[in-house]
Image: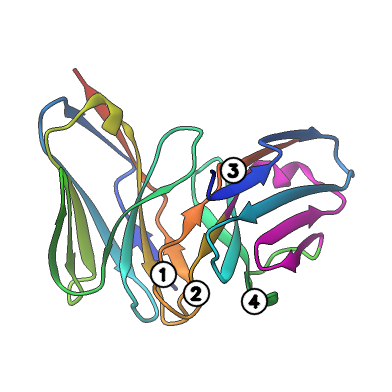
């Protein structure tokens, strides 16, 4: 069974559309994250959730909104997509927050905005 | 500001040894991670160092010097499947991971 899964793997859409990416982890972890990896391969933290509470929000436009129905799921909703949103988005999870826990990554969602 | 530096690209020969360096300047330190990322795939955990010294795990070893803000990943007996990007990441005082841009390692036969 996949530990951290994301859907879809590929997403191609037009500027201005709204889209969602789903993430689920079956590791029993308390903290989940969303990262953006751009063409230069930098991984940038966007959000993290610990026990359904947002604990990090790193200068991300408010067009991006994380939604966590329970601690095993952290979905990413994006409104009014822009060309610059094209990137690979990774979901990750770790046992806790505030601890140096290893983060486990999902397979990534490659978003292309046309 | 916070900064992680590592070489953009390195080339090595199958069967050889390669050392990938990482230097960092962060607000606080709660450990350093190395991840491997094959093209088009997710990063996968390789090692974690929080104390000075060398941690060995099979063909891979990771070294840390906190006073120098320096780490390296040592890969021995290189195999073609080791061709990947290697990401250095430091956990800062807020337990946030600060990532380097990664080192693309090319293995030649």
Q: Secondary structure at mark 3?
A: loop
> In the rendered structure, which disc, 2 or 4, sits on the residue that comes first in sequence?
4
State the residue position of label 1.
A101
Instruction: Rate crowding at label 3 as few (under 14), some (14 to 19) or many (20 or more) other CA atoms within 10 Å.
Output: many
**Residues at badges 3 and 2 in contact (C-beta under 8 Å)?**
no
State the residue position of label 3.
A108
Name the side, left or right, on which A3 lies relative to A99: right
Magenta span dominant secondary structure: strand
Compared with residue A55, is residue B74 higher up or lower down, i.e. above or below?
Answer: above
Marks 1/2: CA distance? 7 Å
Q: Are marks 3 and 4 on the same chain?
A: yes
The subunit carrying tag 2 is A
Observer-side mark, 3 or 4, equals 4
Of A100 and A12, nearer the camera is A100
> In the rendered structure, which disc, 3 or 2, sits on the residue that comes first in sequence?
2
Marks 3/4: CA distance? 22 Å
Magenta span: A63-91
State the residue position of label 4.
A51
The subunit carrying tag 4 is A
> In the rendered structure, which disc, 3 or 4, sits on the residue that comes first in sequence?
4
The subunit carrying tag 1 is A
Q: Quadrant of the C terminus of chain B?
A: top left
**Residues at badges 1 and 4 in contact (C-beta under 8 Å)?**
no
């Amino acid at each position: 069974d996949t530990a951290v899964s994301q859907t879809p793997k590929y997403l191609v859409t037009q500027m201005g559309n709204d889209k969602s990416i789903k993430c689920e982890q079956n590791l029993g972890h308390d903290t989940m994250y969303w990262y953006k990896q751009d063409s230069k391969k930098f991984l940038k933290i966007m959000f993290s959730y610990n026990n359904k509470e947002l604990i990090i929000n790193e200068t991300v436009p408010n067009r991006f909104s994380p939604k966590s129905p329970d601690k095993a799921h952290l979905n990413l909703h994006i409104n009014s997509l822009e060309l610059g949103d094209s990137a690979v988005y990774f979901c990750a999870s770790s046992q806790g927050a505030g601890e140096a826990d290893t983060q486990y990554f999902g397979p990534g969602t490659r978003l292309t905005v046309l | 500001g916070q900064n992680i530096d590592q070489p953009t690209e390195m080339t090595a020969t199958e069967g050889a040894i390669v050392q990938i360096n990482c230097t960092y300047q962060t607000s606080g330190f709660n450990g350093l991670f190395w991840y491997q990322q094959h093209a088009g795939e997710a990063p996968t955990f390789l090692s974690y160092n929080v104390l000075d010294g060398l941690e060995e795990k099979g063909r891979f070893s990771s070294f840390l010097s906190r006073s120098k803000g320096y780490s390296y990943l040592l890969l021995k007996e290189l195999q073609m499947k080791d061709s990947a990007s290697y990401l250095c990441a430091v956990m800062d005082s807020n337990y946030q991971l600060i990532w380097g841009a990664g080192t693309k390692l090319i293995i030649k036969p």
